[in-house]
Amino acid sequence: MRDRVLRWRTELLLAAILLGVVAVNVSLSPFYLRTGNFVNMFQLSIEKAIVAVIMTLVIINGEIDLSVASVMGFSAAVMAALHEGGSVPFAVAVLVALLAGAGAGLLHGLFVARMGLPSLVVTIAGLIGFRGAARILVGDRSIGDFPEWFDRLGQDPLVGRFSLAFIIFVVGIVAAGVVLQRTAFGRAVYVIGNNAKVARYSGISVDRVKLVLLTTSGFVAGLAGVLFAARLGSVRGNLAEGFELDIITMVLLGGVSIFGGSGTLVGVALSILIILNLRSGLGLANIQATTQTGIIGALLIASVLVPNLVDRFGRWRRRSGPAAMPPPASSDTAAGEVRPVVTDPNRTAHRG
Amino acid sequence: MSGTAAGPAERAAVGRRPRPKLRPERLRELSLLAVIGVSVLVFSQLVDNYLSGSFFNRVTTSMAITAVLAAAQTIVILTRNIDLSVGSIVGVTAYVTGEYLAAHQTTAPVLAVGLAMLMGCVLGLLNGTLVAYGRVPSIIVTLGTLAIYRTWLIDHARSRTITADSLPQWLVEFPQRTVVSFGGLDIRLVLTVAVVVILVLQLALGRLRWGRWVYAVGSNPDAARQEGLPTERITLGAFAMCGALSGLAGFMFLSRFGTITVAAGQGLELASVAAAVVGGVSILGGSGTLVGALLGALLIDLLELSLVRVPEISVFWRDAVLGALILLAIAGDFAIGKRLRRFWTSPPRHSSKPPEREATTDA
């Protein structure tokens, strides 16, 4: 039992934070716990949540994809430009846009997997380059007038109260969770994130896993971009600009180590809920969106800093305590052995 | 690719043996210079009246800010960290310094620069403390402070804007101040300051013990710690220096634009990383030079400002070209650099003992 508590320590901490946030929000507004409010809350950031799922896998793999927001903009721009050109049916434009996203991811993947370049640099180049490509396609116009079915798909609920994007998110996170925890591919993702060299020597095709993940990341970003365009009803060159920071925050707050090899989608799901509820609650308390971003930034730092300090304090107490003292039984002091992920200097070799 | 041939640490270990004259960093810097030269030639064919004094001035003034920031970023990257908050630090220092100068018109220029740098240094120290002593990964810390510093600025400013006419006259004229002038080419004071600061820091990194330590920590943090280097203090120092330089860049930003909104400096963090990477600084730490970062900044700003002037290319091409350039730079570095590094790190003929390891086994 104690083992299990320790293993899920991060997730338990996050669940506690989530409960606290929800409790405060309920006290602020009696209408808070209505389904309608909940659905709305999700609807406003659903594209980011979708991308956060694949970003989790990428980061556990020891890589990072900073280009996602630009790829979102790029694939939406591809769709809009084809639509504006008017020579192809709209469904084809959507399909090409999705392929464009996957192509962008494949390009990053080839540079990372085949040439062994750090994904941080490759995807910074992608961040700048694909945003530029989106601007070339759309210019400073705003392209709209999409077919009605497309706008409705983005704006209206599809099943019950849930929109297509929400359903994609739920299906995506469950599928990704199954892949990550129950398949050989998922185990390979963790092993590579822990130690790519060991993974290579144990016969895992490291390059292929990285290539698959980064390509999927591009595809999912493209999908999210198209969904975002459907929700907004129009596409501009700066669509989704700056989203990468929010998405990465969602993942890291969920306890996924930036050095790879550890983290779960349960944690990320909790952190998405925390961020959404926190923003919603701060909105209820009339705190501006910019301030909310700052508070989430502080929460991000604290989510790593506090466990670190607890570990350090525990170690310090053990070292300075009397020698005959029995090993402490409380979970926080023993945690030093369980979660050395962030402090382990060996891991810094793979900084994302 | 960690522990690359940058090697001040390795060279120090081998002793004062004569080395090949052209080290990889130098080669990188020379090839960057060549690329810059070629781009100037190409653009001068495409654009009428391209090689004018006013264009030179525009590029150098704009580059000064990017170069100082790229140098700031480089020092942190050398320690195998990253600082994504530099854009927010530029915004905060530019705004607060502008506010102070608007209220105190008679402030001495030195004091104003000092104020900006001190403020930046404090913000950098906060980053560094969390990274070095809180053991929070730098990307998490600075992603957080990127948002926090900006939020503070927005709260503090309450949507007021610093305008040029509220600033002292000397500050508004500062970007036009010229040190020497050849014909139409003015060497502006901002450019001089940037270049001098970068050269001095480069010397310090190469010659001072602290500088060697910075490279050592970035090449191999474990080895540095086991060697007894104060790795925490070195990391903290790098972040503090990065903050102070960002403050300097903030001051330059204020003087160049005069009008400072709460969004000032947004996006500069990526520009600084891009300039450093194009300049040959390894994102994995321990390898790269400030002069390289300076040249990277020059190339990026040159391309940005030149592309705008090519009539056939719309302004929207800028970012796409920039992204392709960065990919090209790192891919080229990979292709050429891998062979060169193997050559340079191969056992020297006169040494009795081979180097401890091949640097690029897992590249």
Image (cartoon, coloured by chain):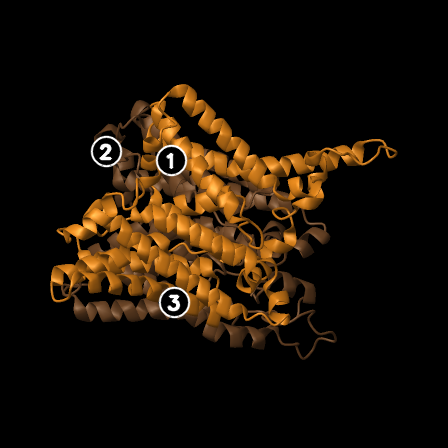
Chain colours: A orange, B brown
- From the viewer's side, name the closer residue of A241 and B342: A241
Name the residue rendered at 20%, 60% in the picture: A137
Amino acid type, mark 1: Arg
Residue indicated by mark 1 = B150
Which x, y percent locates residue A51?
Answer: 39, 51
Q: Nearer the viewer, residue A322 or A24?
A: A24
Q: Nearer the viewer, mark 3 or mark 2?
A: 3
**The image quarter in which residue B6 lies:** bottom right
Q: Residue furthest front?
A: A160
Q: Which element is circle 3 on? A: helix
For the residues labelled 2 and 1, the Cα–Cα distance comes to 21 Å
Circle nearer the viewer, 2 or 1: 1
Residue that label 3 marks: A106
Q: Quadrant of residue A126?
A: bottom left
Counting labels gives: 3
- As helix, strand or loop, the secondary structure at mark 2 comes to helix
Disc 2 designates what residue? B164
Say which amino acid is labelled 3. Leu
Q: Pinpoint residue B174: horizontal percent, then vertical percent.
A: 29, 40
Q: Residue at x 47, y 40 (%)?
A: A271
